[in-house]
Amino acid sequence: MKYRESAGIPERSFDKKDRPAPFVQCQSHQAAFTFLGNILTDARGAGLLHGPRYSGKSVLIGQFVQESLPNAAVAIVDGTRLKATQLLSEILEQFGYGVELNSTDELLNMLRVIVVQQTRSHRAPVLIVKNISHMYPSTLCVLCKLASQMVHKQFALRIIIVGDRSFRRIIDAPGMGPVSNRLIGDFELKPMEMRETLAYLYARLRSLGVEQPDKIFSADVCAELHAVSGGWPGKLDEIALAIFDHGDSLPIRLEEIDHPDIRELFGDVTDSIEASSPVGPEWPKFIVTFSGETLQEFELANSRALIGRSGLSDVAIESDYVSRQHALLIRDRDAVVLIDLKSRNGTFVNSRRISSKVLRDNDIIMIGNHRIKLIYSGGNAGVQIEDPHTADTATMKTVADARRARTGDSRHFAAVDRYR
């Protein structure tokens, strides 16, 4: 508080919940603006914007809507645990049509009429969706239906999908073709350079009424803040807020950035960067075959992958012997666990039926008439196998986590069990 009092800065001044950040167009944001503008003009009219936590995606989108879409119908929705009816109701409400309809079909039909009307008046509406990797499969199906809507052989809805890199596994699923076939590309936000970090911090302070921001953050302090934040604007705000909470004099000194309470914030940005762009590890590799012929190969780079007949599965297998959501692969550190999702015809590993099993290099998963071979020489480090000859007694040190994951995913797919 003393920093703020001596500089005349309002309380919680760097907290975006109370006050939006000024938009400073760094090089990456300028390029993102151009990319988003191309989505509006390209015939396909859909694209992906991604970046890790703290990268400023929400501020960028807000500024783009304000500058480029002042008169268009725009809906910004968060797909996290969003049901199909909730998605459609939120879009309609943000388009200016609050209605009380209960069924997906009624909501979808009304939205189609509005979208067609807007497009015919040369003001194609825009849908911005965040966190589709946390959407329910049934909601993703509705999103695909919206993406397929056309007027005079042109797509009626512009679509911008925003999130971190994990949404690629959803977009690349076979059932997401109506969306993925429209993509003009994807854009990844990059961190600010040192000079951009200084410009951002000074712009933040000037927006709060500070006439001489260099008297608070000197150039060498800005350089240190750039180093510890990785150049991500959200992390800069968080660290600056913590400094104002703990300091008692101006100007801010380099040694104060090394305060234990401030240093605790540094790890988060490292974790977010590493999580968004893994480099170097050997991922578990799977080879899917049918009658001796290789159909596909994939690596388990994400923490989990769904196997099933549904086109929204990460590994889609078209067979009447395969349930729509048949089995789940979970990667926990160096271990890979296979969980059967109560499939109709069962899941087998090395000819033995399992409910769950820690997999080993060269194990053969059998689902219907298909075979899936695991190639993972570095697997199972730190995993304890009670009895290597009994599939169902294979356990992990983190077996409680695996059980929680199984329970959670069973709930997640319960909404679409009727399609099995």
Image (cartoon, rainbow, N blue to C red):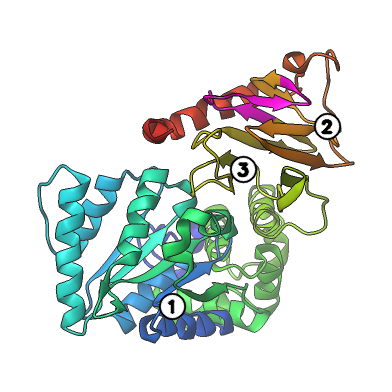
Give the image location of residue 182, x and y in percent: 44, 72
Q: Left or right: where does residue 227 sit relative to residue 155?
A: right
Task: Indicate which label's residue lies in the foreground, 1 or 3.
Answer: 3
Residue 312: % across, % down: 49, 48
Foreground pick, 157 / 224: 157
Give coordinates of residue 196: x percent, y percent: 60, 81
Q: Which residue is mark 2?
A: 360
Please name the amino acid that badge 2 sits on: Arg
Q: Is residue 118 above or below residue 242?
A: below
Magenta region = 338-352
Q: Position of residue 251 (x, y in %)?
A: 60, 71
Residue 15 in which image quadrant: bottom left
Q: Is residue 142 visible?
A: yes
Q: Judge whether 176 appears above or below 383 on screen.
A: below
Q: Earlier in the sequence, mark 1 or mark 3?
A: 1
Query: What is the distance, in whole Å, between disc 3 and disc 2 at their CAs?
Result: 17 Å
Secondary element type, mark 2: loop
From mark 2 to mark 1, how far is it between C-alphas?
A: 50 Å
Q: Circle 3 — which element?
A: strand
Instruction: Examine the rendering and report whether any part of residue 93 can be seen.
Output: no
- Going by the numbered disc 3, the residue's amino acid type is Ala
- Other-residue count near label 3 (Cα within 10 Å), few / some / many at <14 / 14–19 / ≥20: some
**Residue extending farthest front:** 291
Q: Quadrant of the C terminus?
A: top left
Real-space Cα separation, disc 1 to disc 3, in angstroms:
38 Å
Residue at horizontal 47 percent and vertical 86 percent from the top: 34
Rendered residue at 83%/32% (across/down): 360
Camera-nearest label, 2 or 1 = 2
Circle 3 residue:
305
**Circle 1 is placed at which residue position?**
23
